[in-house]
DNA sequence: CTTGGATGCTAAATCGCTCTAGTTGCCGGA
DNA sequence: TCCGGCAACTAGAGCGATTTAGCATCCAAG
């Protein structure tokens, strides 16, 4: 048995297709009695809209697209994305807008999907994550003229809207705190250098190190994996004068680093303080629990949704929203350095 | 400037729409020379297909749907899904079939999405995960007549195809190993009792406990969260005669349990052995590293894709594929119980 | 009694593509 | 020379919805 169409409903009720369309979309053009009968029959026949047909007509797709180009192994462990997705979806579904998520191999594929979805009216707008230094996706989205919101900033995202947290500010607060505890040799196990936020964090550390006159402040780039996080930690702790504090760009790497410290007999927090960018179950589960920069990622996703809906409603609008700066939650992994005896 | 359509191409080349359609889809009906010219112009105009229009005509959507009804907090930490997705996508994209992923609040919403996507021809088939005891989704999918593959089994999924790993066999291997080490009191921190696989694991433990004449073998249900995993562990370890081994239904809960053991001064593995169902970075990162039931989740996803494509190609076909049983990888968290002195 | 404007509805065009049923032109065979 | 057959291509219907133009009908005001 075929799926019912508005034509079937029209026949059944004895009115025209147009009338049915008006009734089902709650717009004027039909009387109350007819409208009620149409809705009744539609329900009985278990009718539901054919989104492809709607899209053809040029109507709203009532969906936004999110394409992520990342190896799944990275994606899996980071609670950040799941939380973000959850918030995003909550915000969108309030206006019954769906979220179309696709995970692809690389940025090339990601841009191709943008083009396809845009030209097929599959979505009304895009959310772009993992802003890179000189990001080619910006240009594609601008060219397509599709509403888009970039997660990340500030700046460097052309004419697109953005929602961002201040990574620089967050990093400064961590460095200040560690310096106040007495740390003079601080290392930073960073993420992919191609990411804008990695760059901002790295630069923040360097800037502040100069101002505070720290003895050492290195950033070691990694690919965000636990393996490279562990390797970087091993290298750092093998030095003659090893750092007394390490800041990790993700919770997974922090956990891996904690493991390496244990394996090398370096006591946390007595001989080494550890701080993680991004908070999650992992930092709380660990022993000792890891001090982390925490933020309400769910709320972040919600804000993203809000901005997205605004931009869709009013194309051409450009919004730049700065969200709350992640705040340092101190747990058991940070303490004054062992050798600290005043300045 | 409007997006180019086949009509534009037809005009430009000087042929009919039909010819263009034939050429672009690589089917007979046009000469080689014309075909080449059409493809050339299509490329120049940067044309790409409008999937909605295709779907309207009743053609393949070249996409499969995966809807997950889970709180994002659970989703985020478990690497299982990301790995699975990755494998699934790899398998599908080999035939350039896309994957449409949606995360929803509950099973009701999930079924609604099934109906919508099916009636809108948005996907050619569905992958269903998290098979429940008496699962209402089975009926919906059968009624829709859409090709579908269930992850989980064996049995209890009506006329739908399935891909599954033998949870029972896996649990038995763990229990046998622990018993061989000398453990007589084994606990099981289980997942949601509504899940089929939770049920199978629980039953396997109970069955084997009888056969091996164990002193104790309890299963404690949880919601898969680290919080409940920790709470269950606390309760178990607070008993007068506490278990000497605990099997956790997920890696996250195992990690949480390990934390609780540390906090209560129970030494792992000397006083307590820990085993995790599902392997990942987390079990390797932990200290001591956690013994876990490991499987190639990526390959699992790939197999899922294969079966999905087969079922789409030949509707009505029913396949039941049993994949490799997860194998126990022994790490540092398992050992003979401290008090063990022969029988 | 006529006119004007709502109101309630219909008919048909439209969106981009696929696919079937022709139509045309050319080649080879009798 | 004529015809059958095939390859190459065209015309146009159809997919399920939206949307616009237009047509009755009815009521109120002049």
Image: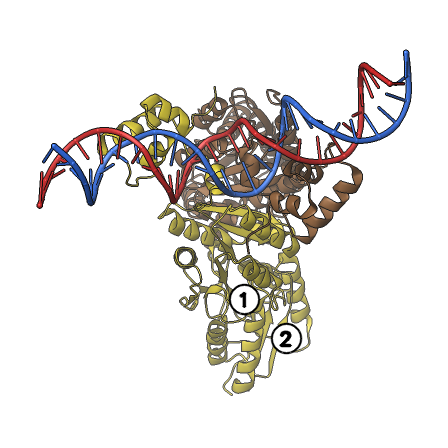
Chain colours: A brown, B yellow, C red, D blue
Q: Which residue occupies 49% across, 36% down? A: A187
Pair 2/1: label in front: 2
The answer to which quarter of the image holds residue B230 is bottom right
Residue A190 visible (yes or no): no
In this rendered view, identify the residue nearer to me: B147 or B213. Answer: B147
Query: Quadrant where the C terminus of chain A lies?
Result: top right
Left or right of B219, for residue C8: right
* Residue B315 place in picture, x, y as percent: 43, 59
Q: Is residue A167 left or right of residue D11?
A: right
In the depicted structure, whether residue B342 falls above or below residue A102: below
Q: Are marks 2 and 1 in contact (CB under 8 Å)?
A: no
Give above or below for B203 relative to A283. below
Secondary structure category for the residue under label 2: loop
Question: Chain letter of disc 1?
Answer: B
- Numbered badge on residue B242: 2
**x and y, in percent, of residue A176 in the image:** 61, 31
Where disc 1 sits, the SS reads: loop
- Say whether mark 1 and mark 2 are on the same chain: yes
In this picture, is B195 found above or below B184? Answer: above
Residue at image point 38% right, 52% down:
B91
Q: Which residue is mark 1?
A: B268
Q: Earlier in the sequence, mark 2 or mark 1?
A: 2
Mark 1 neighbour density, 10 Å: few (under 14) some (14–19) many (20 or more): many
């Amino acid at each position: 048995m075929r799926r019912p169409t508005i034509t079937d409903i029209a026949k059944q009720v004895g009115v025209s297709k147009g009338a049915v369309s008006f009734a089902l979309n709650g717009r004027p053009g039909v009387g109350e009695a007819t409208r009620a009968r149409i809705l009744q029959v539609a329900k009985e026949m278990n009718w539901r809209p054919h989104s492809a047909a709607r899209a053809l007509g040029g109507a709203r797709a009532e969906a936004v697209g999110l394409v992520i180009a990342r190896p799944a192994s990275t994606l899996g462990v980071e609670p950040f994305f799941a939380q973000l997705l959850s918030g995003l979806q909550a915000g969108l579904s309030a206006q019954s807008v769906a979220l179309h998520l696709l995970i692809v191999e690389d940025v090339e594929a990601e841009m191709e999907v943008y083009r396809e979805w845009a030209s097929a009216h599959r979505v009304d707008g895009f959310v772009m994550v993992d802003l890179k230094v000189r990001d080619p996706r910006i240009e594609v989205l601008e060219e397509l003229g599709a509403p888009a919101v970039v997660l990340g900033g500030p700046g460097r995202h052309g004419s697109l809207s953005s929602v961002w947290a201040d990574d620089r500010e967050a990093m400064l607060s961590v460095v200040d705190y560690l310096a106040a505890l007495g740390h003079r040799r601080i290392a930073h196990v960073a993420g992919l250098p191609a990411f804008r936020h990695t760059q901002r964090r790295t630069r923040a550390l360097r800037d502040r190190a100069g101002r505070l006159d720290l003895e050492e402040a290195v950033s070691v780039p990694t690919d965000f994996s636990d393996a490279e996080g562990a390797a970087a930690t091993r290298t750092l702790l093998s030095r003659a004068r090893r750092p007394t504090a390490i800041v990790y760009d993700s919770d997974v790497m922090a956990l891996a680093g904690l493991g390496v410290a244990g394996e090398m007999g370096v006591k946390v927090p007595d001989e080494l303080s550890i701080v993680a960018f991004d908070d999650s179950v992992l930092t709380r589960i660990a022993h000792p629990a890891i001090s982390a920069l925490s933020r309400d990622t769910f709320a972040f996703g919600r804000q993203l949704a809000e901005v997205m809906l605004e931009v869709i409603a009013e194309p051409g609008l450009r919004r730049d929203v700065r969200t709350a700066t992640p705040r340092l939650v101190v747990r058991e992994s940070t303490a004054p350095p062992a050798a600290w005896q005043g300045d």
